[in-house]
């Protein structure tokens, strides 16, 4: 075990958010994916497990429940989660790939999100098509913009319906100042596409799963780990044992 975990104890006396990963099935196959999600993902929650989790949540004084994956919409339990937890008065958040909501099989979730007042956190790795294509594949950029427009039309980013975006860089780059990025995103999306959103979060890609393998294939893994250490994102004395 790393000395970091032996010397630094983490204490939590209360919390008001639970994040639930309901599977690694996703309509995309992104190069940076930390959980190895893809259209072939088979590690997905069944209904019995979902109902057990719901029963437990209802016993706890937890305000917000957030769903991630994969992309949650593709899991058969997701509608059950939304319905039962909304009826219980929970605040719901979904982290979506966006493009899944272009699929006729899942487009109905747009209306469900409005009905249940679900906060949408959407991945958009760049406001430039070429960079998004490099990370997420051809056609993803245009489909993402179309779904963002549909969310705006439903009242998202206004009328108390929250829409946040997530930026994460391509390759070994690290994100620049988050406020600058948010301003850039807001200006370009509004001026060029008439799209609005609430907040932008920038994240650093951890070298695990598919992203780690991609770095290894390019002989960039050690360089990237050193960069994370230099910038203070990685402080483990035994370097990489936890991310193997």
Image (cartoon, rainbow, N blue to C red):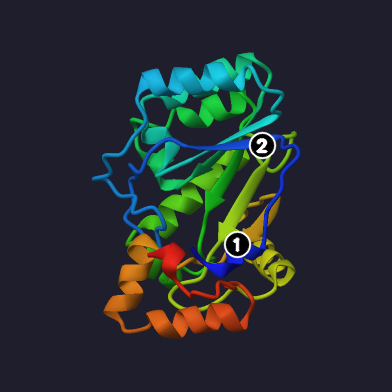
* Tag 1–tag 2 contact (CB < 8 Å): no
Q: Which mark is residue 6?
A: 1
Q: Residue at x 56, y 20 (%)?
A: 56
x and y percent of residue 8 in the render?
Answer: 67, 61
Tell me if 187 is positioned left or right of 4 in this view. Answer: right
Tag nearer the camera, 1 or 2: 1
Q: Which mark is residue 17?
A: 2
Identify the secondary structure beneath mark 1.
helix
x and y percent of residue 60 in the render?
Answer: 67, 22
Identify the secondary structure beneath mark 2.
strand
Which of the 4 image quarters holds residue 115?
Answer: top right
Q: Nearer the viewer, residue 167 or 56?
A: 56
Circle 1 Cα neighbour tier, 10 Å, few/some/many (<14 / 14–19 / ≥20): few
Disc 1 versus disc 2: distance between alpha carbons? 27 Å
Residue 218 sits above or below residue 81 on the image:
below
Circle 2 Cα neighbour tier, 10 Å, few/some/many (<14 / 14–19 / ≥20): some
x and y percent of residue 126 in the render?
Answer: 52, 66
Which of the 4 image quarters holds residue 91?
Answer: top right
State the quadrant of the C terminus: bottom left
Residue 240 sits above or below residue 9 on the image:
below
Q: Looking at the image, is mark 1 or mark 2 earlier in the sequence?
A: 1
x and y percent of residue 169 in the render?
Answer: 51, 70
Q: Residue at x 63, y 80 (%)?
A: 231
Residue 62 sits above or below residue 241 on the image:
above
Tell me if 204 is positioned left or right of 25 in this view. Answer: right
Tell me if 40 is positioned left or right of 121 in this view. Answer: left
Tell me if 234 is positioned left or right of 225 in this view. Answer: right
Q: Residue 133, can we see it?
A: no
């Amino acid at each position: 075990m790393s000395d970091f975990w032996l010397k630094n104890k983490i204490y939590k006396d209360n919390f008001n958010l639970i994040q639930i990963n309901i599977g690694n099935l996703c309509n995309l196959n992104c190069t940076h994916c930390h959980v190895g999600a893809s259209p072939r993902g088979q590690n997905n929650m069944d209904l019995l497990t979902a109902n057990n989790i719901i029963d437990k949540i209802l016993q706890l004084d937890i305000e917000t429940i957030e769903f991630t994956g994969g992309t949650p919409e593709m899991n058969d339990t997701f509608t059950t989660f939304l319905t039962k937890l909304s009826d219980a008065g929970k605040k719901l958040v979904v982290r979506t790939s966006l493009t899944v909501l272009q699929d006729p099989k899942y487009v109905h979730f747009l209306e469900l999100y409005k009905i249940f007042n679900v906060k949408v956190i959407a991945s958009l790795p760049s406001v430039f098509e070429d960079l998004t294509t490099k990370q997420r594949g051809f056609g993803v950029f245009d489909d993402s913009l179309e779904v963002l427009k549909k969310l705006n039309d439903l009242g998202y980013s206004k009328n108390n319906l929250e829409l946040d975006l997530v930026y994460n860089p391509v390759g070994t780059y690290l994100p620049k100042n988050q406020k600058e990025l948010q301003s850039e995103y807001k200006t370009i999306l509004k001026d060029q596409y008439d799209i609005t959103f609430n907040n932008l979060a920038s994240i650093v890609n951890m070298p695990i799963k598919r992203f780690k393998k991609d770095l290894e294939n390019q002989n960039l893994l050690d360089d990237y780990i050193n960069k994370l250490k230099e910038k203070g994102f990685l402080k483990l004395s035994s370097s990489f044992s936890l991310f193997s």
